Image: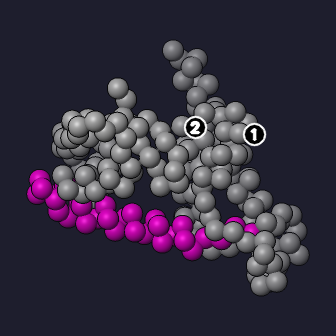
């Protein structure tokens, strides 16, 4: 039976062993000790533990995160566990600082509206799950593809360092990333 993961936003998705490998590999690389073999072995421990728990076919993403950190700390990779925690904290902090303003920026006058405080009612906290829901409901995109696109958009916003983001910019980023992901999916389908 496939393990289900309850995400922070309440959504449920299938457990992917490859995500655990990627997370551990990134943590190891961040401390200058990249080793895919070690990442695969440690991921096996995490997956084995999750599947052997009695009568539990779900796990929260924060439980899985804690298990990964515990496995790293117990296997002489404490620095990687700390780096993973710091990375997670930084991402949460970046998310909390971003606000989306319901403005369609087409001209300089529109951009100036971003700085005015009289549009506080048109601001909302950044939440990538809105992109996921929109892509699923309005465009019939699979949940996994929608999450990939939303993550790509979020990464771009983080790299831009913006704290006030016009909704029109998010829309353009979603369209661009959706086109790239869908193009890649079609190319993969043609190769098989």
What separation in Å lies between label 2 and label 1 (alpha carbons)?
Answer: 12 Å
Q: What is the quadrant of residue 141 in the picture?
A: top right
Instruction: Name the residue: 32% across, 50% down.
Output: 64
Pick whichever, 189 or 71, lies toward us.
71
* Residue wearing tag 2: 143
The numbered disc on residue 115 is: none
The numbered disc on residue 138 is: 1
Instruction: Name the residue: 29% across, 48% down.
Output: 25
Q: Which percent across, then down, holds residue 75?
A: 11, 53
131 relative to 183, above or below: below
Residue span colored magenta = 72-101
Instruction: Name the residue: 30% across, 42% down.
Output: 21
For the stretch drawn in magenta, the main secondary structure is helix
Q: Which percent across, then down, holds residue 143?
A: 57, 37
Of the 4 image quadrants, the one containing the N terminus is: top left
Q: What is the quadrant of residue 62 in the picture?
A: bottom left
Q: Around disc 1, counting alpha carbons within 10 Å, would you say few (fewer than 14), some (14 to 19), or many (20 or more)?
A: few
Q: Which percent across, then down, holds residue 136?
A: 66, 39
First in residue order: circle 2 vs circle 1: 1
Which secondary structure, mark 1?
Answer: helix
């Amino acid at each position: 039976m496939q393990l289900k993961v309850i995400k922070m936003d309440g959504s449920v998705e299938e457990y992917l062993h490859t995500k655990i490998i990627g997370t551990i590999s990134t943590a190891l690389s961040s401390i200058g000790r990249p080793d895919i073999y070690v990442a695969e072995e440690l991921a096996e421990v995490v997956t084995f533990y999750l599947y052997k728990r009695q009568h539990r076919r779900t796990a929260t993403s924060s439980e899985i995160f804690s298990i990964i950190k515990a496995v790293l700390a117990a296997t002489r990779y404490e620095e990687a566990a700390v780096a993973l925690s710091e990375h997670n904290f930084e991402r949460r902090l970046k998310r909390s600082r971003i606000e989306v303003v319901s403005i369609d920026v087409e001209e300089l006058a529109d951009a100036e509206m971003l700085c005015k405080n009289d549009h506080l009612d048109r601001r909302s906290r950044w939440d990538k799950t809105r992109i996921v829901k929109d892509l699923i409901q309005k465009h019939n995109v699979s949940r996994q593809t929608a999450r990939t696109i939303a993550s790509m958009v979020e990464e771009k916003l983080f790299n831009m360092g913006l704290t006030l983001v016009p909704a029109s910019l998010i829309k353009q980023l979603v369209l661009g990333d959706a086109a790239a992901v869908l193009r890649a999916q079609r190319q993969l389908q043609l190769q098989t």
